Amino acid sequence: MAIRIITDSAADFDAVVAKRRRIDVVPMTIQFGSASFLAGKNLSNEVFFQLLQAGKENPSTSQPTPAAFLRLFEEARAAGDQVVAILLSGELSGTLQSAEIAREMCDYEPIYLVDSRSATAGIQILVNYACKLRDSGLPAASIPAELDQLKEKIRIFAVIDTLEYLRRGGRLSGFQAGLGSVTKLKPTIAVRDGTVGIAGKSFGMAAAVKHLMKMLEEHPIDDDFPSYFLYSDDKSREELLLPRLKEQGRLPLRLHYCGIGPAIGTHIGPGALGMAYVERT
């Protein structure tokens, strides 16, 4: 009896990595006007940000349908496999609810659903840990409890380069967004307890990165787990942060890169950078 690990496209997994680690990824739907795409399937991050910047309105994002999860659950039932699904925070999306509906429809007991309380590479950390536990022989029923302990220590901090996409999505008024562009306001956001909030506001990118480094110092990185440099459309933004961390001897030992996809990229836009990791306690 095998254990199948499932997540959704909000985890921003590289398709090659997901396949190698035997992870099934259920895609979200992204709608640009009349054009509909499946994130990670027929819409790459690169094309997504090109379309995002070309339009005047934000795209709409839809969680996977129960049918998308049901297909995978029924495949597992037919094979006699167990399922552990680690999904985008229930505070941010109805993805978890879709999976819950599918589980009821499937009527198959060994399906375990985990609310990541996180997004993007924060989900990746949990999924990769679940794979490690699976490969070590831990029973599927025991994996969610291990993930519940770990997810309390996952931290995501990121700097937003522009307020325009928060305005488009209705998170800011036009006046507030205009004020931000005039004053070069760069917010630092944090994903914590399943939601996204403002962790600080700085004038200019240099000050924002300095504040980001302060957050990383106050919440130190645990090198027993992988860490991820996050970027929306421009990987070279690493030059604003990683050399400074290296100078201070705080560059993570197990550093990876994660391009932010549509689920979060719709709201933060291009030019964002940050870190996702497990906090040392």
Image (cartoon, rainbow, N blue to C red):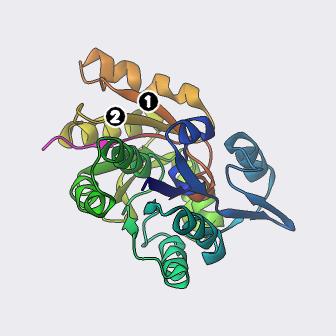
Say which mark, if any, is on residue 156. Answer: none
Out of 201 and 139, give the one closest to the viewer: 139
User: Residue 64 is drawn in which quadrant?
Assistant: bottom right
Q: Mark 2: which secondary structure? A: loop
Dot 2 and dot 1 residues touching (CB under 8 Å):
yes
Say which mark, if any, is on residue 226. Answer: 2
Give the residue drawn at x 39%, y 24%. 242
Out of 187 and 254, give the one closest to the viewer: 254
User: Which residue type carries mark 2?
Assistant: Pro
Q: Is residue 95 above or below residue 152?
A: below
Instruction: Identify the magenta region.
Output: 276-281
Say which mark, if any, is on residue 256. Answer: 1
User: Which residue type carries mark 1?
Assistant: His
Q: Is residue 124 above or below residue 205?
A: below
Give the residue drawn at x 51%, y 51%. 11
Within-10-Å neighbours for mark 1: few <14, some 14–19, many 20+ = some
